[in-house]
Image (spheres, rainbow, N blue to C red):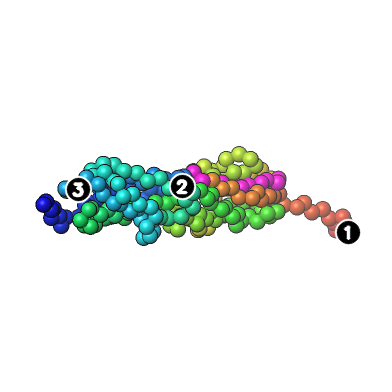
């Protein structure tokens, strides 16, 4: 009769996606390799956010293996793989994070408020991305339908003021802001109208005439 003594757990390496991957895809493939001596087949589990998600009881030793999950919602995910050999020795990988983000930033115009009259406008807005708790968005300031300032780095969920704008002729103008995150999810504000007026009123004296 033959028996095998094995007290060594399998080693598990995560191949892809790499740690801190950001993606817009709701379908993601998780690739790993489990290595064990002396067994040729392993029983492996994929964990998502600490909970078992799927299993494969016939993972080949030292062979890249994949699981594909579909319909994943926006959010931050932690994933890892745990494998057991025929002697019930269990080994697991380190955890990695995956961000799925298909949501565009929201852009709110702060000032000048709609229908403002001004001699020299300063443009202030806030861009917010719920899946980017800290970090930078990129924004374009558009005035009268044309880019006025491009690729401005804007801190997430923080009011941003831009005073480096071209001089405006007197008259009515419109403005809006478009911002995008690192995955090119793009959001555009509503359009506001402002009027530039730098000409003082003229005043004429009618009567009594001078030196009356």
Of badges 2 and 1, the one in the foreground is: 2
- Mark toward the start of the polypeptide (2 vs 1): 2
For the point 65% across and 42% down, the residue is 144
Residue that badge 3 annotates: 39
Which residues are the magenta region?
A: 171-185
**Relative image position of residue 10 (x, y in whole percent):** 21, 52
Spatial distance from mark 2 to mark 1, Cα to Cα? 86 Å
Task: Tell whether position 177 is magenta.
Answer: yes
**Relative image position of residue 108 (x, y in whole percent):** 59, 55
SS type, badge 2:
loop
Q: Which residue extends farthest top? A: 146
Spatial distance from mark 3 to mark 2, Cα to Cα? 31 Å
Closest to the observer, 115 or 103: 103
Closest to the observer, 193 or 37: 37
SS type, badge 1:
loop
Residue that badge 1 annotates: 208
Crowd around label 3: few <14 · some 14–19 · many ≥20 (10 Å):
some
Q: Which mark is residue 200?
A: none
Is 120 positioned to the left or the right of 209 in the image?
left
Q: Which residue extends farthest front? A: 1
For the point 46% across and 47% down, the residue is 70
**Relative image position of residue 116 (x, y in whole percent):** 68, 55
Closest to the observer, 48 or 119: 48
């Amino acid at each position: 009769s033959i028996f095998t003594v094995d007290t060594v757990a399998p080693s598990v390496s995560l191949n892809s996606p790499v740690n801190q991957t950001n993606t817009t895809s709701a379908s993601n493939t998780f690739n790993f390799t489990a290595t064990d001596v002396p067994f040729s087949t392993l029983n492996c589990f994929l964990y998502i956010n600490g909970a078992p998600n799927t299993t494969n009881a016939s993972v080949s030793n030292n062979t890249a293996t994949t699981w594909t999950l579909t319909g994943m919602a926006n959010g931050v995910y932690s994933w890892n793989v745990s494998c057991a050999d025929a002697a019930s020795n269990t080994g697991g990988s380190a955890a990695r994070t995956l961000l799925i983000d298909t949501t565009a930033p929201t852009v709110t115009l702060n000032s000048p408020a709609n229908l403002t009259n001004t001699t020299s406008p300063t443009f202030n807005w806030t861009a917010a991305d719920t899946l980017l708790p800290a970090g930078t968005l990129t924004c374009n300031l558009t005035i009268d339908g044309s880019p006025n300032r491009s690729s401005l780095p804007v801190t997430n969920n923080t009011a941003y003021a831009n005073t480096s704008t071209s001089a405006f002729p007197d008259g009515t103008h419109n403005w809006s802001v478009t911002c995008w995150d690192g995955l090119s999810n793009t959001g555009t504000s509503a359009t506001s109208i402002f009027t530039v007026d730098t000409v003082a009123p003229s005043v004429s004296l009618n009567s009594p005439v001078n030196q009356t």
